[in-house]
Amino acid sequence: MPRPGPAREADLRVLRDDGHLATALGRLTGDALPPLLPTVTGAAVTLVLLLAGLGEVSGITLFAPAAVLLLSGVAAGHPHDGRFDWMAPPVLRATEYLYLLALGHQAGVPGPLVYVLLTTVALHHGDVVHRTRWAAGPPAWVMRAMLGWDGRMLLVAAGGMLGWLPFTYGLLAGYLTVLLVWETTTSWLATPVTTAGEPPRNGWGGVASTPQT
């Protein structure tokens, strides 16, 4: 069975890793809004809100995911075929990582717990990029189950509002880790083993001899 070839053009909307809410907003607006400007604006607003609440978990800090969702989510339905639209997914990645790191630090979440959550999310993003390059995008159910950047950020913000931030980080990290390991393992087990490159066998199962030249 031949290996799949690399995809000629990756669908950047898959690399965005949008969750349910961002996808719904994108459907409402369609392709009317180019993605780069609102995504960069959302990242800038997040940075400002994090700096405004520096050193503490405040309402203004926890508002950041909603602001990013409203600014960047509305462009989720755009085909991302512009010259610089490829920059939108990396900006979203950086925004999510910054928010999870800064909020965990401000709330006193144990460092190893923050590291595990960030590592799991980064591994998920790396897996999506690798699969997309080989024209074998991740299953739709996995993308939905991973909650998307908007779902993860909003869940952490909700945990902060309830005063359960360390618990939320631990719960989210555990859930994403189990899901990622389970899906990766089942995908590997379901991959057919190719016999290309193996030496030819004779009728008794041994390696067939080749004529000398």
Image: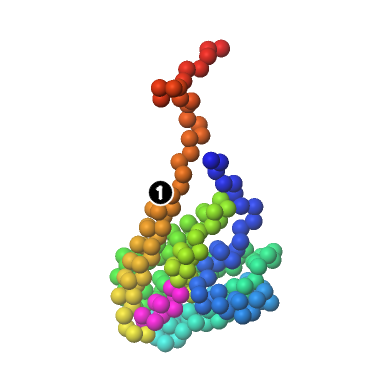
Kind of element beneath mark 1: helix
Task: Residue 88: tell me if it is visible.
Answer: yes
Residue drawn 36% across the image and 74% down it: 104
Q: Would you say 114 lies left or right of 20 here?
A: left
Against 27, residue 197 (above or below) is above
Residue 211: image x %, image y %? 53, 14
Give yes or no for residue 191 being in the magenta stretch.
no
Q: Which residues are magenta?
A: 151-160
Q: Closest to the observer: 9 or 85?
A: 9
Against 45, residue 97 (above or below) is above
Q: Quadrant of residue 50?
A: bottom left
Q: Closest to the observer: 33 or 206?
A: 206
Q: Would you say 41 lies left or right of 54 here?
A: right
Question: Residue extending furthest top?
Answer: 213
Residue 47: image x %, image y %? 50, 77
Residue drawn 34% across the image and 85% down it: 162
Residue 165: image x %, image y %? 33, 78
Label tally:
1
Q: Which image quadrant: the C terminus?
A: top right
Q: Main secondary structure of the magenta part?
A: helix
Give yes or no for residue 157 being in the magenta stretch.
yes
Residue drawn 40% across the image and 54% down it: 186
Q: Which residue is labeled 1 in the image? A: 189
